[in-house]
Image (cartoon, rainbow, N blue to C red):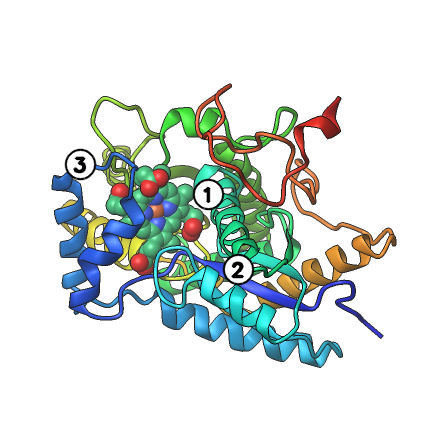
Amino acid sequence: MTSLSPYDAVLLLSFGGPEKPEDVVPFLRNVTAGRGIPDSRLEEVGEHYYAFGGKSPINDQNKALLAELRTELAARGVDAPVVWGNRNWDPYLTDVLRELHESGARRVLTLVTSAYASYSGCRQYRENLAAALTTLAGEGRELEIDKIRAYFNNPGFVAANVDAVVAAYERLGAAPSPQAPLVFVTHSIPTPMEVASGTETRGSYSAQHHDVAAVVAERAGERLGHKVPWELAYCSRSGTPFTPWLEPDVNRTLAALHADGAERVVLAPIGFVSDHMEVIYDLDTEARETADELGMRMERAATAGTAPEFVGGLVDMLLERAATERGEHPEKVTTGALGPWRDVCAPGCCRLRAGVDSGVPAACEQPAAALA
Ligand SMILES: CC1=C(CCC(=O)O)c2cc3nc(cc4[nH]c(cc5[nH]c(cc1n2)c(C)c5CCC(=O)O)c(CCC(=O)O)c4C)C(CCC(=O)O)=C3C
Ligand SMILES: [Fe+2]
């Protein structure tokens, strides 16, 4: 018999996105509050959303994931509530937690829709959780929240990406020589955020991606029966030109590969868990335009989405964490070389700038005193 005990509920915590054109500007204001993104970039990103009718696909994708998580948890004998909340759009995190408390939940296990640990994928969500807990405590509602460890090297997440890469190569057709390169893509982040990502002893944001990429390329190669030459590229840079961000940009990588003689390419967005705006705009629209201009044939691999291996892997991790909290010692299976991430983040984990805390309290983190 599997159990979620000591937790009463599961929270799927995501980014949120606009549902209609009138939502776009208020959504972007929520996203960028105090984040120093130039207006020109906001107008540009607004256009990406308007090009898709003012609706991001991310909310529907989260509803689909929520449904699959419920089904899989139920199949394993867990009947706890599983709810969805966002940092930047309705349903808002604080409202969802208030309702959970109303329905009697006191201990909640959270899973965020970011697989990798960095400020954007880890700490920012934990800061939002801390703020929500403070608001609710002010209403006399006490909740305890934990978050499952970073899941980039979860075998289910990796397996879903291997399947997607194999399928993309199959769509590309018979093997030419030289083999079509595989370009893994993730969200670029500012270099200071990269430096402060991960923990003192474990891989940074980019190192986490390299760890996943190496395993996915090797396993895909085994299935396809040929070597898969790969590299890692970045998309969705914003911020001012004066701050360095992780490079190369995927469009530059495509041009460089083309200059080296590649006529075909597979793009695998391992940095994203579903086909949200970054994927359908920055890759399926912009990068595809680049490939077309270069005369390259491009296949974009699917994201993990609601692939059964991915959903199963997430549920494994929810149940693993529950077991750990009960004092059991569940096996933590991972792929690659980095090993399982910490269950509870170290003090200052994924802080915004190297050596300097973001200055805002974050939940799901050991108190600094616990280190001494
Ligand atoms: C690492 C990372 C992920 C991947 C992990 C994950 O998947 O969570 C991610 C996801 C997402 N980012 C998203 C949207 C945006 N991100 C922005 C801005 C930024 N992202 C950053 C990083 C990341 N972001 C950073 C360092 C910034 C700049 C400053 C800051 O804010 O720290 C901006 C502002 C305009 C712009 O700068 O582009 C928008 C609109 C959406 C929703 C998409 C939809 O609606 O379908 C999703 C899933
Ligand atoms: Fe983003």
Q: Earlier in the sequence, mark 1 or mark 3?
A: 3
Q: Secondary structure at mark 3?
A: loop
Identify the amino acid type marked 2: Glu
Between residue 211 and residue 109, name the one nearer to us: 109
Q: Earlier in the sequence, mark 2 or mark 1?
A: 1
Identify the amino acid type marked 1: Gln
Q: Position of residue 278 (x, y in %)?
A: 31, 53
User: Can residue 178 be seen?
Assistant: no
Q: Position of residue 361 (x, y in %)?
A: 52, 37
Q: Position of residue 90 (x, y in %)?
A: 36, 66
Name the quadrant containing residue 319: bottom right
- Can you identify the residue that label 2 sits on? 139
Residue at mark 1: C-beta within 8 A of ligand 1? yes
User: Can residue 56 be seen?
Assistant: yes
Identify the amino acid type marked 3: Pro
Between residue 338 and residue 36, name the one nearer to us: 36
Between residue 335 and residue 5, name the one nearer to us: 5
- Can you identify the residue that label 3 sits on? 38
Q: Residue at x 25, y 37 (%)?
A: 238
- Can you identify the residue that label 1 sits on? 124
Q: Residues within 10 Å of mark 2 (few under 14, many from 20)?
A: few
